[in-house]
Amino acid sequence: MREDGSLGRPREFDEDEILLKIMDLFWDRGFADTSLSDIMRVTDLRKGSLYAAFGDKHAMYLKAIARYEALVVDGASDILRGPGDPLARLKAFLTAPVDAAWTAGDMRGCFLCNASADRAEQDAETRALVARGFDKLERAVGAAVADLAPQLDAGARKAASTHMLSVYVGLRVMARSRLDRERMEGARDAALASLAGPATAG
């Protein structure tokens, strides 16, 4: 009997570590191009152990998106809502896709973006997770925009936040498309310049 009172042998693997491996696999290859055999190979676990811990392939995919949200989306939100110069916070947010691609060599783009194109249209659960992640990012961007340009009304702040999120998503797609760093930085800088005017107006 396990410590929680349930029957069966305790699991002899770290579920968080395994879920990270599953997340990386789906992030890189997408849902359709990731097979259960791929997951078994990467995790070094059998089907029964995977299903017992995480559910079927679809459930694993949803858990992978949720883990991405906890790691990447929440991390970006913390930066955007953090202390210091709000323009610097926004620049850090838009620089992250550039550095991921051209400093860390990570050309996978954004898992939320990938999932949106890969599964969101046909899978309501994926669509809900993607929408939740993007909404969280947009609200965090909105907090930084409000700090940068408090004179903006709610409508203008919303428009600026949506614009910044759109640029971020575009940069993630550009990374996956392997567009050069100079073009990505140019898009980032133009987006930030569009906020500099409202920040100093009024």
Image (tube, rainbow, N blue to C red):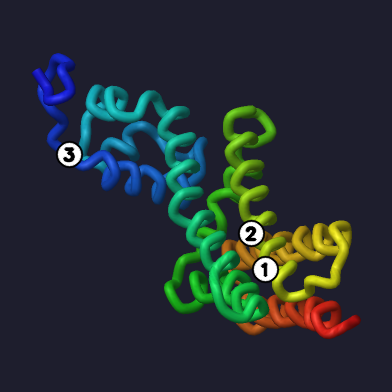
Q: CA distance from mark 3 to mark 2?
A: 35 Å
Q: Where does residue 95 sit, x and y in percent of width and height?
A: 58, 75
Which numbered disc covers residue 13?
Answer: 3
Apparent side of residue 67 relative to residue 93 in the rendered image (left or right): left
Q: Give whichever of 45, 163 is nearer the camera.
A: 163
Within-10-Å neighbours for mark 1: few <14, some 14–19, many 20+: many
As shown in the figure, which amino acid type bears the numbered disc 3?
A: Phe
Q: State the image coordinates of residue 132 (x, y, percent, origin top left).
A: 62, 42
Single out the mark in the foreground, 3 or 2: 2
> Which quadrant of the figure has residue 67?
top left
**Residue 98 shows in the view:** no
Marks 3 and 1 sit apart, C-alpha to C-alpha, by 40 Å
For marks 3 and 1 on the same chain, the one whose residue lies earlier in the sequence: 3
State if disc 2 and disc 3 touch (CB < 8 Å): no
Q: Quadrant of the C terminus?
A: bottom right
Q: Which residue is mark 2?
A: 140
Q: Which residue is mark 1?
A: 144
Under tag 1, what secondary structure? helix
Q: Is residue 13 above or below residue 186?
A: above
Residue at point 34%, 39% (across, down): 38
Query: Which of disc 2 and disc 3 is earlier in sequence?
Result: 3
Toward which corner of the image does residue 139 lie, by quadrant?
bottom right
- The residue located at (14%, 14%) in the rendering is 7
For the residue pair 51 and 133, the one nearer the viewer reads as 133
